[in-house]
Image (cartoon, rainbow, N blue to C red):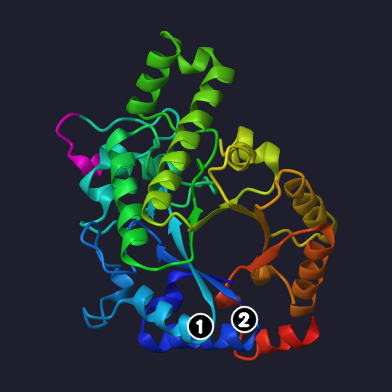
Amino acid sequence: MWVVRTGLTSPAAVDRVVEEAAQGGLNALFVQVRGRGDAFYSSRLVARSPLLSGQPAKFDPLRRLLDRARERGLAVHAWVNVLLTSHFQPVPGDNVVALHPDWIMLPRDTTAPPPGGGPGGLLSAVRQKARGNGDAEGFYLSPSSAPAGDHLEAVVREVVAGYEIDGLHFDFIRYPSLEYDYSRVALDGFRRLSGGSVAAQAPAAWAAYRRDVLTNLAARLSRVAREERPRLRISAAVVPDQATALHQKFQAWPEWLAIGILDAVCPMAYTQDLRIFQEQIGEARARVKPGQGLWAGVGAYRLSLAEVAERIAAARAIGATGYVLFSHESFAGGDLRQLRGGR
């Protein structure tokens, strides 16, 4: 089960998540320890989440959850939102987006702020450009930015080195849409690597560049995690439709599986249409090699308990090696026990 950060805001909330998961017969929790560029763990690099402002400084959500999960026999995967780093507003002053606005992705034709307008001007311009665009959920770091890559590497290393987790789970390791990333660093990087080409005049090469940059970042973060914990299982939540993933989100996750960046893949097959769910999981099954995991993402927030059970059965029949439910917030007190009894 995916556990979003709102389930980690107090010791009682953490304990409740673990207990309900254990009673429901689940065996692993994917815990959102980095939601919007912040920390639900003890960090020297990034700010503690504002959602924890009412808790004592000694409260470490990830540490407590690990301790409770071990008592109940549950594996714990640290869920890291990689590129999505802040809501559009308000942006906390200690968030990396506020501190380094030059690290973010830009949508096409973003109007640059006037000279001397300050860092907030760029954020305002991106916010204005993204208004009405449902693809972007906030500000995203650019995978073309070397400092942003260094920052993300340090974040991953800190989490993996500091906690005896069973897995590292990447999310939002994708572009919001094909309208991103028109930041100066991305455009300059493409021009340099392509021998002077301009993005608008070489659409196929420009798309390949964005895929390659993201693949390189995924490989880098995966390598760093394995350096710290060689037996760690590394997975990613991915766009289930492969054409959309490759050509709109520039997320080449089939390649990530093929070259071993990932140990497992979680297609976010949140459709309410059972046939489409089966097709998406079946297509992913064809990409998974022996020894790799296919963990079907089930959008429980959109489904009845009977439909969740139906998706689980369908995923098993197709050959998925597991499933992950999105998310803990979708279940009332006894729902998981009921689901366990009905499958």
Q: Position of residue 156 (x, y in %)?
A: 36, 53
Q: Position of residue 197 (x, y in %)?
A: 45, 10
Mark 1 / mark 2, whichever is N-terminal: 1
Q: Amino acid at mark 2?
A: Phe
User: Does residue 282 sit above or below 308 in this rendering?
Assistant: above
- Which segment did they paint magenta? 115-121
Based on the picture, tell me whether residue 131 belongs to the magenta stretch: no
Q: Amino acid at mark 1?
A: Val
Q: Position of residue 74 (x, y in %)?
A: 54, 78
Of 252 and 303, the residue lying toward us:
252
User: Does residue 68 sit above or below 265 in this rendering?
Assistant: below
User: Horizontal placement of 32 versus 162: left or right?
Assistant: right
- Gap in angstroms between the C-alphas marked 1 and 2: 10 Å
Marking on residue 247? none
- Residue at x 82%, y 58% (from the top left corner): 318
- Residue at x 29%, y 56% (from the top left corner): 91
Of 14 and 225, the residue lying toward us:
225
- For the residue carrying disc 2, how many other residues have a C-alpha within 10 Å: few (<14), some (14-19), or many (20+)? some
Secondary element type, mark 2: loop
Quick check: can you spot residue 122?
no
When asked about the image quadrant of residue 26, the answer is bottom right
Outermost residue on the left side: it is 116
Quadrant of the image for the N terminus?
Answer: bottom right
The residue labelled by disc 1 is 17
The residue labelled by disc 2 is 331
Q: Position of residue 326 (x, y in %)?
A: 61, 68
- Residue at x 52%, y 12% (from the top left corner): 201
User: Horizontal placement of 231 versus 152: left or right?
Assistant: right
